[in-house]
């Protein structure tokens, strides 16, 4: 008697569908769609707007996180940009090599239409990842906007101010010690700067504009030249006038000799380095508050978290 042979059990439908996805063109359609969406997102973060608003803030943050972006100059590491752009392409190329027989089938538009769900799934995955990044960025920005109360005397220092001979924008000899008995706000700029220095001047004008007249009368602002080899009194005077900052409340100063000015900048921790390719000066954006005794009391930066403290620190010293 012949015993009928039993056919092997058929695999579950779900397993069969999964197997077809990973061995057929569906996987490559999914990866291709995901790659297209991801590359479009990266191009937005590279060439997108960096101004005000939610999009501009996200693009600036992403450039700093992933491209070693410098918000002062707008520059990025193009090596980091290249790596970010090429990594997902390599993944898709490897998949294409492993499933090279299937790649040939992708020439048919009808095949893409049959796998629209796979393409949609690839775009959904990218959209979910981008949404997660945007949500994290917004949460981080919101957390950074919550500023603790001004610590006052707890962060106050008493650092001596170097007594170096300087020359202001009117060509008049000047020393920081000349302003002893006044509160002094010291920062650093240079006339040809087109990145951070306009923000420094904007902040100076805002601070002066917000101070009550009685407090403002006791404040002097001194801007140290960060480009001592090239800035003359005429250049500094023109720059001060263009920024609407009047002498003698505002003094733009340089050293009598460039090497002495560089020593002063170094002693006050205004780090300055010149980019050999662009000639742009990368520098620290500092605001030093000098009390009536002629000592550095507080140090702040352009960081949004410091701007409120800068105003409170000034009022703290002016009303002592």
Image (spheres, rainbow, N blue to C red):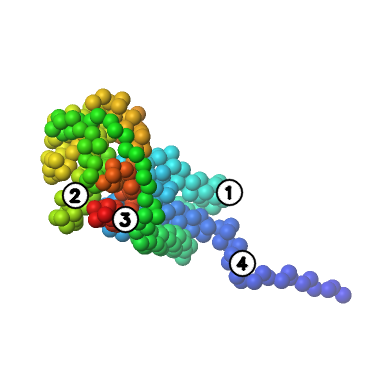
Q: Earlier in the sequence, mark 4 or mark 2?
A: 4
The structure residue drawn at horizontal position 58% and vertical position 62%, both measured from the top left corner, is: 20
Mark 2 or 1, which is nearer the eye? 2
Secondary structure state at the residue bearing disc 4: helix
Query: What residue is pinned by disc 2?
Result: 218
Query: What residue is pinned by disc 4?
Result: 16
Can you tell which mark lies on residue 309? 3
User: Label 4 vs label 3: CA separation?
Assistant: 64 Å
Pointers 3 and 1 in contact (C-beta within 8 Å): no
Across and down, in percent, residue 253 comes to: 21, 34
Secondary structure state at the residue bearing disc 1: helix
Crowding near the residue tagged with mark 3, few <14, some 14–19, many ≥20 C-alpha atoms within 10 Å: many
Query: What residue is pinned by disc 1?
Result: 98
Q: Earlier in the sequence, mark 2 or mark 1?
A: 1
Question: Can the viewer see residue 188?
Answer: yes
Q: Earlier in the sequence, mark 2 or mark 3?
A: 2
Query: Picture quarter containing residue 213?
Result: bottom left
Q: Earlier in the sequence, mark 3 or mark 1?
A: 1
Secondary structure state at the residue bearing disc 2: loop
Q: Residue furthest right?
A: 1
The structure residue drawn at horizontal position 29% and vertical position 33%, both measured from the top left corner, is: 163
Secondary structure state at the residue bearing disc 3: helix
Across and down, in percent, residue 179 comes to: 21, 40
User: Label 4 vs label 2: CA separation?
Assistant: 81 Å
Q: State the residue in front, 296 or 221.
A: 296
User: Label 3 vs label 1: CA separation?
Assistant: 59 Å
Q: Is residue 60 above or below residue 160?
A: below
Query: Picture quarter containing residue 320?
Result: bottom left
Crowding near the residue tagged with mark 4, few <14, some 14–19, many ≥20 C-alpha atoms within 10 Å: few
Can you tell which mark lies on residue 289? none
């Amino acid at each position: 008697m012949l015993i009928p042979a039993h056919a092997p059990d058929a695999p579950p439908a779900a397993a069969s569908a999964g197997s077809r996805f990973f061995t057929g063109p569906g996987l490559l359609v999914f990866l291709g769609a995901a790659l297209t969406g991801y590359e479009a997102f990266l191009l937005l973060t590279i060439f997108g707007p960096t101004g005000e608003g939610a999009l501009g803030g996200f693009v600036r943050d992403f450039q700093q996180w992933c491209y070693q972006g410098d918000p002062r100059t707008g520059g990025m590491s193009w090596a980091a940009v290249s790596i970010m752009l090429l990594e997902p392409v390599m993944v898709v190329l490897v998949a294409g090599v492993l499933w090279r027989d299937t790649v040939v089938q992708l020439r048919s538009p009808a095949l893409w239409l049959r796998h629209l769900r796979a393409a949609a799934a690839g775009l959904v995955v990218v959209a979910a990842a981008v949404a997660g990044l945007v949500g994290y960025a917004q949460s981080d920005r919101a957390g950074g906007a919550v500023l603790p109360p001004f610590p006052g005397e707890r962060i106050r220092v008493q650092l001596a101010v170097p007594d170096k001979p300087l020359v202001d924008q009117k060509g008049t000899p000047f020393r920081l010690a000349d302003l002893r008995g006044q509160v002094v706000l010291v920062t650093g700029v240079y006339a040809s700067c087109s990145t951070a220095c306009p923000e420094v001047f904007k902040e100076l004008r805002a601070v002066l504009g917000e101070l009550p007249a009685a407090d403002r009368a006791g404040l002097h602002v001194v801007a140290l030249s960060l480009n001592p080899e090239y800035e003359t009194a005429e250049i500094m005077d023109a720059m001060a006038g263009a920024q609407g900052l009047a002498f003698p409340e505002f003094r733009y100063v340089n050293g009598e000799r460039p090497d002495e000015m560089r020593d002063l900048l170094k002693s006050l921790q205004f780090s300055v380095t010149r980019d050999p390719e662009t000639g742009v000066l990368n520098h620290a954006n500092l605001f030093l508050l000098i009390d009536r005794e002629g000592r550095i009391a507080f140090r702040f930066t352009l960081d949004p978290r410091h701007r409120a403290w800068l105003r409170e620190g000034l009022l703290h010293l002016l009303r002592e």
